[in-house]
Image: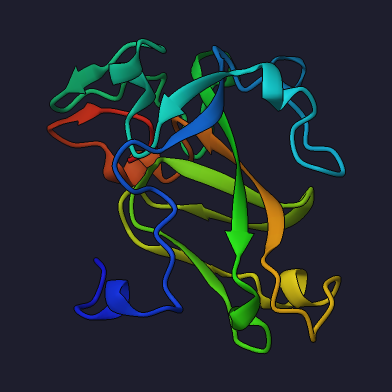
Amino acid sequence: RIEEGHMDSKYFRLLTPPGTRWKFHFSETANRDAVPHVGAQGFPGAERWGDIDVPRSWETAGHGQAIYTNFVYPFKCDPPHIPADINHVGSYQTEISIPGEWRGRRVFLQFEGVSAAFYVWLDGNFVGYSQDSFLPAEFELTSRLHSTSNTTSLAPSKHVLSIRVLRYCDGSYMESQDMWWLSGIQ
């Protein structure tokens, strides 16, 4: 939830306004050889990927299939394990611009709905991991943004934001209920 007034601040930047499209790669499995690996500047070759609207579940964009369950898990029940061969993975990448006037300020990246688990990298450097669909996840980017840039320049700095989303995680055992299983940055 965005608190009232934040969107009017010059220190707030919405990365997913209506019409936003990010680079997207869909993997049918979470097996290591099927998933793109992060390099020094994010996912190599991402410029050749297709695009997807963000926010949006990837099933509604034609990747994988939405699943409805009421009391049965959509995977073999073996807590805390999730079978890699049915765990779809969505890899996202976009470029973000940080205003120069933000230098010297703390900068946070917040997600308000990602299903079910995800990893975040900035310029190829690991930022963090979160799971628990639809609870806010927040990552501080300050040291990663200001350590390499000219601290006196007011020019914006460009950065590559890379995200890997897993359809299921061990937390999926707690979340399973009468619901549609939809994945991605939503």
Q: Is residue 23 above or below residue 93?
A: above
14 to the left or right of 126: left
Task: Give the camera-side residue of 174 and 139.
Answer: 139
Q: In screen coordinates, is 28 left or right of 172? A: right
Left or right: 78 as drawn, with respect to 160: left
The spot of residue 78 in percent (x, y) is 46, 29
At x 69%, y 26%, the residue is: 46
Q: Residue at x 13, y 26 (%)?
A: 70
Q: Position of residue 5 (x, y in %)?
A: 23, 81
Q: Which quarter of the figure has residue 61?
A: top left
Q: Camera-side residue: 101 or 47?
A: 101
- Residue at 29% from the left image edge and 25% from the top image edge: 73
Q: Residue at x 74, y 33 (%)?
A: 43
Relative side of 178 to 53, left or right: left
Q: Is residue 83 visible?
A: yes
From the image, which quarter does the C terminus lie in?
top left
What x and y, as percent, mark residue 75? 39, 19
